[in-house]
Image: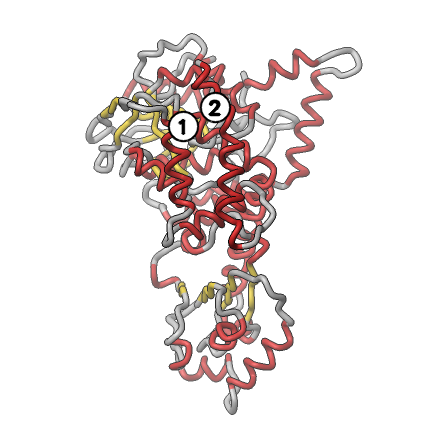
Amino acid sequence: MSPSLHHTLHSRYNPQKEAEKYLASLDLPLGIRFFILIEPGREYLIPLLYHKFPLAKIIALHLDAPSLPTAAEEILVQRWSPEQGIPLQTFLEQEIPDTLAAAIRIIEWRPALTAYREEYRRILAETVDFIKRIDANTRTTYAFGRRWFRNFFKNLRLIHRVLVQNTAAASIPVIVSAAGPSLETAIPLIKDLQCQSPHLILAVSSSVQALRGRGMVPDVIIATDGGGWACFHLYECLRGIDPHAPLVLAASLSAALPSQCEGLVLLPISDGSLWQQQILQSLGLPCISLPQRGTVSASALDLALRLTQGKIYLTGMDLAHKDIRTHARPYSFDRLLEAKASRLNPGYTQQFTRSKAILDGGSHAIYAAWFNQHVRAYPERLFTLGSNNPVFNALNPRTLQEQAEQPLVLRVQTIPWQDDPVEQAAALLLKALAHPLIGARIQEELGSLLALEAPRETQCVETLSTQILKLIEPYRRAHKNG
């Protein structure tokens, strides 16, 4: 930071006192776990924050390479600046868990707004979008956390054949198919060009019925939704498909998976939490770790970036409705609406009500903002195909003409369970809860996931252990009875 800019951002006479007065004016409450500072200059605020909130994590977002006073250099702070080459959203995801939105506080150093103007506003807007997104995830976790937890244990018994990733060097192009209404117009183009050159088709589960209705079967299906209704998509995905076909199901272990998935080659997806990592590593179960995104379309993009070094084509990512149509047709939920239709509750009215509820929820705007920031990090690899959301307009529209430089070879490993995986996983988790090094973090993760009241510290392990055993008891009992 240049000397002239330093004088612009801070008092010439007593910058420390200036920082003290500003911090006192904020009247910060206790309980803040993360402070995000937007261009704090020479970081005179940080020693003051550290003294008042010694257990909080401090994150400084700089618009230039930071020039720090000695006091700030001695404090552990996570710093970001554009010259690091890491997208801001990616950096924040690495530093802040996605279930702690309420414990985050943004602190602006307002003189920086005058100095940096639009760049300052952009960084602030990206940070606010990040907090909105993880706040949406927090609310979803509060509603469905226990179901996700039970799903994790239940799904372990479905795993017998696992895809082992040996595709890091593969350069085959990948088509990521989401389920937006525009997928209908993109399918004929994909189908014609598939005959010219093979591309790996990675489809979210809700788009598979639309693909199969036009004679296309994807190579990889991804499912991440933990709600019970998500099974309807997979029922349709697997209806009439040869169980020995070369089809891979990439599934979050917290997702709702029907028993029909047991015969498939699975690519288990961990959410990156420490408790899941500990169990999966101890079981020796190959998996891929992807952050929770809240929408399967974002997870599909994450997975595509991990599966190939080649080009990735996005289709069906409308993040919007076409009139009252929420998804490409045929769509799994259409059967449910038709079955419930009556003279007093016609299907058209149900579609309108569902469409309006989704729009009022605001999720489209939240995820559009995430894609808008994320896709800019891969300008040479991502392309838009068909009428996707306008946030993808920055990508190059492209027809599929590239030849695969090498085939995508899939290696499958059989999992020879010697004992019941649910019993093994439960024992491993209870052991990890009491571990002196990692136990506290796992207790925090599960306390948030299971929406437990914060117990006294001496009761935390006992409370969580009892809750865990109670939640998974039906699956343990079913195995014993079976």
Q: Position of residue 451 (x, y in %)?
A: 58, 43
Three-letter residue code for mark 1: Val
- Asked whether disc 2 touches disc 1, contact meaning CB atoms under 8 Å apart, the reply is yes
Q: Earlier in the sequence, mark 2 or mark 1?
A: 1
Q: Position of residue 391 (x, y in %)?
A: 50, 43
As helix, strand or loop, the secondary structure at mark 2 comes to: helix
Three-letter residue code for mark 2: Tyr
Residue 84 shows in this picture = yes
Q: Position of residue 262 (x, y in %)?
A: 38, 17
Circle 1 residues within 10 Å: few <14, some 14–19, many ≥20: many
Q: Position of residue 299 (x, y in %)?
A: 43, 36
Quadrant for residue 432, please give it.
top left
Question: Would you say 390 lies left or right of 199 here?
Answer: right
As helix, strand or loop, the secondary structure at mark 1 comes to: helix
Q: Is residue 10 above or below residue 154?
A: below
Q: Is residue 123 above or below residue 417?
A: below
In front here: 187 or 432? 432
Question: Would you say 219 lies left or right of 30 here?
Answer: left
Q: Residue, x 58% and y 51% (percent of image)?
A: 454
Residue 387 shows in this picture = no
Q: Is residue 432 above or below residue 31?
A: above
Q: Residue, x 52% and y 38% (percent of image)?
A: 466
Question: Would you say 295 lies left or right of 398 here?
Answer: right
Q: Residue, x 50% and y 27% (percent of image)?
A: 473
Residue linked to disc 1: 422
Q: Which mark is residue 475?
A: 2
In the rendered image, which quarter contains the C terminus? top left
In front here: 131 or 272? 272
In front here: 359 or 431? 431
